[in-house]
Image (cartoon, coloured by chain):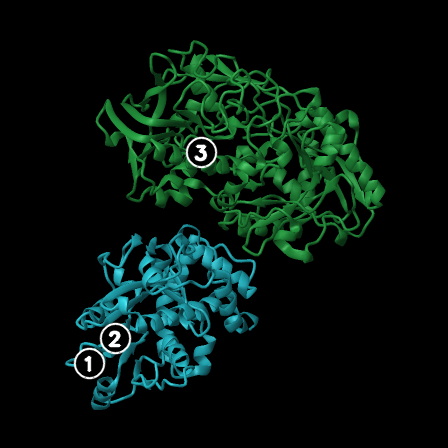
Amino acid sequence: MIGEKIVVYGAASPLGRRVLDALRANQHINPVVADRLNREALRTAVRDADIVINATMGSAAAISLAAKRLFEALRGEAPSKRLVHVSSMTVYGNAVGQCNETSPPVEPLGKYAAAHIAAETEAQGFSQMVILRPGVEYGPGCEAWSGRVAAWLAHRRIGDLGAGGDGYCNLIFIDDLVHAVLAAMRSPAAAGRVFNVAMAGPPTWNEYLIAYAIALGATPARRMTRRRWTLETRLLAPPLKVAELTVGRFPFIARQLPSPIPPSFRHLCAQTIQLDVTAAEEILGLNWTPLIAGLRAAATAYGLVVRR
Amino acid sequence: MLLDTTDFPDNHEIRADIIIVGAGAAGITMALDLIGCNQSVLLFESGGLEKEPATQHLYAGAVVDARLHSPPDRYRQRRLGGTTTIWGGRCMPLDPIDFEVRDYVAGSGWPITYTDVEPFYARANALCEAGAFAYTTDATFGPAALPIVAGFTSPDYSTHRLERFSCPTNFAARYGHKLRGRHNVQVVLHANLTQIVLDENGTQVRQLLLRTLSGRRLTARGGRYVLATGGLEAARLLLANRDRHPRGIGNQHDIVGRYYMCHVAGTIGAIQFACPTSAVYRGYRMSPEGVYCRQRFSLEESAQRREGIGNFIARLHHPRITDPAHRSAILSLLYLAKPLIPYEYQQRLHGADGNSPGDWLRHVTNVVTGPIEAASFTWHMVRDRMLAERKFPSIIINSKANLYSIDFHAEQYPNAASRVLLDDTVDALGMPRIKIDWRYLPEDVHTVSRALEILARDFAASGVGQLHYDPALVETEITRYGAYGGHHIGTARMGSDPRSSVVDANCRLHAVNNLYVAGSAVFPTSSQANPTLTIVALALRLAAHLSRMEALR
C-alpha cells in the first residue's frame, strides 16, 4: 500500500533478506531495517510503523535478544499495529505425530525451543500479532538446511539414515515462507493467530536427503551405518564444534574443517512430528513449492559445494 | 506397542478389530500401514526378538524327497521380522503376463491384474528399501546405461530390465521403532496360534487360541483375521484346524497345500564371449539413490506366448564353485570358507564335484596362487557386505578369460501334485507338523530348455559369443540344488472359483467370511520374480481393503 511503513527486524537472516527484497520490489514501500538501531531509534521506528516484522533467526541468544529489544520498543504502541513474528516449529519440543497450533510443547525443551516459546509469549501480548511457526527452511540462502546439508552430502557424511531418518522433514521452501510473511501482514483474518508453516505431506528425512543428493548430483546416496552415524553425531560433533569456535576467526583454516553434524540434527531426523498446516492454507491462502522444484533451486545455489 | 504374552494373565482374552498372525514381511507391512487408522490391530508373533531354537523347531517337519527340497525349518525364521531377518533382498515386481490366464500354463490366471497391484508397488519398494519403483535401465540410469554385453541383440530377450536389492532390510530391526510406538497397533510376541475357532456354520472365525511354549494361553477375538505366516505355515494352520471343516479350513475342494511352487533355478553351460572383456558387464550398479541394481536377460512376453513356455530370466554367472577347475582364488576361498557361511547361502558350495581330497587340495592351490585376488576379495566382502548396512548382494567375479556360465530363474508351473500336507508327528504345542512333497513338471524343464535354446541362438546370432551346454543336463541342473530355497508359493491360491482356489481376489477365504491370507501362499502362479516385493505389495493392498471394510461397518 502506498506510504505504508514497515519495519523489519532480523533483516540479516536468510528470511529477512528475502522479505526485504520482496518488499522493496514494491516501489511504494521503503522498509526500515531495524537490526542496528539503538534503543531510541528502534522505538521511533516502530512507533511510526504500520507493520513490524520480526524475522530473526539464529541462536537462542539471538532470538532472545531480538525479542527483548523489539518487544520493549513495541510496548505501549497502538494496538492496531500488525506484528508478524517468525517463530519456529521447535516450540513443540519433543512432540510426535500431527501437531496443530494448539498442541502443547513436549519436554524436554532445549534452549532454542525455550527462547522461541518465551518470544512467542511476548508477541502474544499484541492483539494484532501473527505468529508463524516455520518448519525446516530450505532453498537458496538457507545455509543451515540447504548449504551445510549439501556439504555433508557431497562429502558422503550423510545420506540414507535408515531408521534414524524416518522422522518427518517439515520443509518450507524459503520463498513460501516469504509469501507467508507477506500474507500475514495483510490478512485481516490472521490477526491474533498462530500458523504452522511447512509443506503439506512432508517427506521423511531419508526422502529429503536422498532427493537432495540426487538434485546435487552427489550420487549414489550413501546408506549410513548406525556406527558411522553415531560416530558423526556423538563422537566427532563435539570436538569439531570446539574446533569451529576456536578457529572461527581464521576463515581460511575454518573452511578446511568439516562442519559438525550436531546431536540435535540426529534427534530431529528421527522425530516423527508432522505439522498440521491446514490453517496456513485456508487463512493465509498459502501454496507450497513442490519438493523437486525447491530442491533444484537449492542445488543450483549450493551445487558448487559438490563440485568442490 | 510391543508386548509379550507374559504381559497378560493366563487365559486372558484380547480383542481388536483386526488380528494378524505372523510378524514377517506381510504381517509387519500390514501393521505399519494400519498404524493411525481407526481400528485396533493386534499382530501376533510366535517368536521373540531373536532366534530361539525351541521356537524355530516348531517349523521342523518332513520332506518327501530331501534331494529336492530343503528341510521345512530352513529358509524361514520364526521370530519378529520373520524370514526378512535372513533374506537375500532381491526385489522385482511380477510381470503383467504373470497375472494372465495362459492356455499353455494349466492353472494360470489371477483374479486380479497387474494394474490392481501396481499402485502398491512403489510403497512396497520403499518398505523393502529398494529405492524408486523403477525397474528398467532407462528409468534408473538414463541414456548412459550400459548393456550387459555390448553388441548383444535379441528379438526375444530384453536386457534393460533390472532387479533391485534391498539392504536386505530386516523388517524387525528397521521398523521395530515404529511398532513400539504408542498407537492403535499392538504386537504380542511368543504367541503361537494353535486353534482357529469357527462358528457353528463354519463360515466365521469366532476367536483364535494362542499358546506359549511354556503353556500360557491367550484368546483373541476380532472382526477380521489375517494369516500372515508364510506359504508353508498358512497351509499348515488351515489344514490342522478341522473342527468345522473336516478336511481343514477352506479345504472343501482339497486345494489347500496343493499347487506348492518355488522357482526352477540353476546354473548351466559356458559362454565364451568373443568381444573384449570390457564389453561384458555382469556386476551391480548403484542407482542414484544408492541401491544395488543388476540387469538380466528377460524372456519377452511375446516369446513366452509364441513358445508356450513360462516366465524366465537369466544372468551371467561365474563357473560352478565346487569345481576347482575354475582356477579362481576367490571361488576356491568361498568353497573353503563354507563352514562360515550361513546355511541358506551355502547351497551352491555343496555338490557332487569338488569333494575329494584332491579337489580340496586344488582349491587350496587356487587360493595360494592368487593371494592378492583372494585378499582383495576378502577386504571387499568385509567392507561392502559384513560392515555395510546396504550389503553388496552377492559374489561377482569378472572373468579375465571372458568365460561365464548362465544362471537362470524360471517360473514353476502350478501342479496339484506338488503339495504341503500334514505329517503324522506333532510339535511341542501338539500341532501336526508338515510334510513337503515338492514336485515339478516336464513343462518346467521345457521352459528352461527352450529359453536356453533361444538365448544360445541369440548370443550366436549377435556374434558376441557361443553358449555351450548339454541340453540333456537341463533337468539335472534344475534339480542339482532342489527347489529354490525360501520361495513358498501357491498353497492357498487366489481365484474366483472356490473349487479351484482357496482365497478370493481380496485374499479372503471363499469359505470363511472374516479370514484372510497374506503372503505368497495366495499367488496362483509363481512368475520369474522373487516373491517378497509382491508379498509386501499385496499386504499393503490387503491392509487398504481391510481399512475400507472396517470403515463401512
Q: Secondary structure at mark 1?
A: helix
Q: Position of residue B254 (x, y in %)?
A: 52, 13
| Image quadrant occupied by the N terminus of chain A | bottom left
Q: Position of residue A308 (x, y in %)?
A: 55, 73
Question: Is mark 2 in CB contact (under 8 Å) with mark 1?
Answer: yes
The crowding category of the residue bearing disc 1, from other C-alpha atoms within 10 Å (few below 14, some 14 to 19, many at least 20), is many
Q: Secondary structure at mark 2?
A: strand
Which residue matches tag 2? A83
Question: Is mark 3 in CB contact (under 8 Å) with mark 2?
Answer: no
Name the amino acid, label 1. Answer: Leu
Identify the chain of the residue marked 1, using the numbered disc in the image: A
Is the residue A123 above or below the residue B528 in the image? below
Residue farthest to the front? Answer: A2
Q: Which one is in front, B499 or A155?
A: B499
Identify the chain of the residue marked 2, using the numbered disc in the image: A
Spatial CA distance of label 2 from label 1 is 9 Å
Q: Which one is in front, B293 or A215?
A: A215
Which residue matches tag 1? A74
Q: Is residue A53 left or right of residue B230?
A: left
Which residue is at a point 31% across and 44% down the rendered structure image? B181
Q: Which one is in front, B184 or A109?
A: B184
What is the letter of the cyan chain?
A
- Frontmost of labels 3 and 1 is 1
Residue farthest to the left? Answer: A76
Which residue is at a point 47% across and 20% down the rendered structure image? B235
Name the amino acid, label 2. Answer: Leu
